[in-house]
Structure formats: structure tokens, C-alpha cells
Image: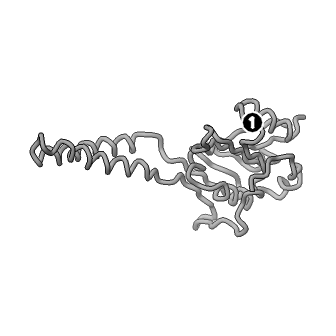
């Protein structure tokens, strides 16, 4: 049977991550002190944040390009170009990848219409690492460990982007079975990024 330390090493090797640039820890390590807020159905829903950079680019190109061309075109043509640019950006946003939603409840985790039931696993860890040297973007996984030592990686990179780790870790800590906390060593030789 594979140990948690071996899983950590395997993930580091698989993703080419060095020893200083990752987080591999139980959800409880990064959870807020207070429990996550539940909706009326008893679920905690964590949504991918709205891409404000998209909104900024759309508005600036819809205004800047017509302003740059105003001396060559009639005013209505500049307005039409701005409207077309805004329309194209809106279609790209609507047709692009859908925002990721993580739903956590007493039965398990659901993300991208894929469900993971608590009863199928014996432990849960979070694995975050920087994708580039500037750490402007991170890759994030939930590592669900099965009784036979195998594990399942659940990619939460989109929902975790723009959010701090605690926003994702808190509902996981709140809903994970008590047996998760007792069945795996909670103090691994992980990097302490506090």
C-alpha cells in the first residue's frame, strides 16, 4: 500500500515541482476558523471568480480602437466598430470554458458534473503548486485517497484561481467524514507556507 508521503513524492515528480514551490496538506490546515456558509439545500458552493481582466479588455478595446480610428471614420462607424468588438468578446466569453463550480455537501464533492462520494475514499489532501516562476497562476488538485492506497486527482484550478486556499479548504474540512481526520497522518513533512 502506498503511503501519503509516497503520494506526495509521486505528485511532485509527475508535475516537475521542486521542494519549495508546493503545498500538500490536509484541508484543515488552510481552512478558515469559522465554518463555510451553506445554501438553503445544505451545500457549500464555491464558484470560479468573474474574470475582471476580460471585462477590462472588452471595455478598453471597445473604446480605444474606435477612438484611434475616429479621425478616419464617421462617428457612427466608430460606434459600430466598438459594438462589434464588444459583441465578439461577449460571444467568446459565453462560448469559452464555463466557470467551474465546486459543490461540497454531506455526501461528497461535485465539480464539472462529476461527483466524488466521501464513502469511496479514506482521506483528502490539497495539492497546490505554482505553474510559473512568478506564481501568477497555480495548479490546484484535491487528492482523494482510496483504501487500497491509490488516489484520484480532482482538478480545481479554475475554481481556485483568484481565490485563496481557505475558500476551497473550509467546506472540504467541514464536510469530510471524521474518519478522514483519524485515518491518515495529519502531520506530514510538508512545506509550511504560513
Q: Is residue 142 visible?
A: yes
Residue under circle 1? 18
Q: Quadrant of the C terminus?
A: bottom right
Left or right, 106 with reference to 46:
right
Left or right, 63 with reference to 145:
left
Neighbour class for label 1 at 10 Å: few (<14), some, many (≥20)? few
Q: Is residue 113 visible?
A: no
Left or right, 54 with reference to 183:
left
Residue 79 point in image, percent of width and height: 17, 48
Residue reaching furthest left?
Answer: 74
Q: Residue at x 72, y 43 (%)?
A: 22
Of residues 101 and 5, the one drawn nearer to the viewer in this rendering: 5
**The quarter of the displayed image where residue 134 is located:** top right
The secondary element bearing badge 1 is classed as loop
Q: Is residue 13 above or below residue 25?
A: above
Q: Is residue 73 above or below residue 173?
A: above
Q: Quadrant of the N terminus?
A: top right
Residue 175 point in image, percent of width and height: 73, 59
Residue 27 point in image, percent of width and height: 75, 54
Amino acid at each position: 500500500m502506498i503511503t501519503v508521503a509516497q503520494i506526495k513524492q509521486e505528485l511532485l515528480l509527475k508535475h516537475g515541482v521542486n521542494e519549495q514551490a508546493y503545498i500538500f496538506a490536509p484541508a484543515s490546515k488552510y481552512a478558515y476558523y469559522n465554518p463555510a456558509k451553506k445554501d438553503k439545500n445544505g451545500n457549500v458552493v464555491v464558484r470560479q471568480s468573474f474574470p475582471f481582466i476580460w471585462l477590462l479588455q472588452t471595455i478598453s478595446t471597445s473604446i480605444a480602437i474606435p477612438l484611434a480610428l475616429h479621425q478616419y471614420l464617421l462617428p457612427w462607424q466608430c460606434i459600430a466598430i466598438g459594438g462589434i468588438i464588444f459583441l465578439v468578446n461577449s460571444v467568446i466569453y459565453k462560448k469559452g470554458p464555463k466557470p467551474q463550480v465546486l459543490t461540497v455537501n454531506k455526501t461528497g464533492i461535485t465539480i464539472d458534473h462529476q461527483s466524488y462520494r466521501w464513502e469511496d475514499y479514506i482521506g483528502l489532501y490539497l495539492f497546490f503548486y505554482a505553474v510559473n516562476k512568478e506564481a501568477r497562476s497555480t495548479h490546484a488538485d484535491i487528492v482523494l485517497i482510496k483504501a487500497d492506497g491509490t488516489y484520484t486527482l480532482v482538478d480545481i484550478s479554475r475554481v481556485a484561481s483568484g481565490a485563496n486556499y481557505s475558500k476551497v479548504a473550509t467546506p472540504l474540512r467541514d464536510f469530510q467524514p471524521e474518519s478522514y481526520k483519524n485515518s491518515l497522518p495529519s502531520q506530514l513533512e510538508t512545506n509550511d507556507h504560513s
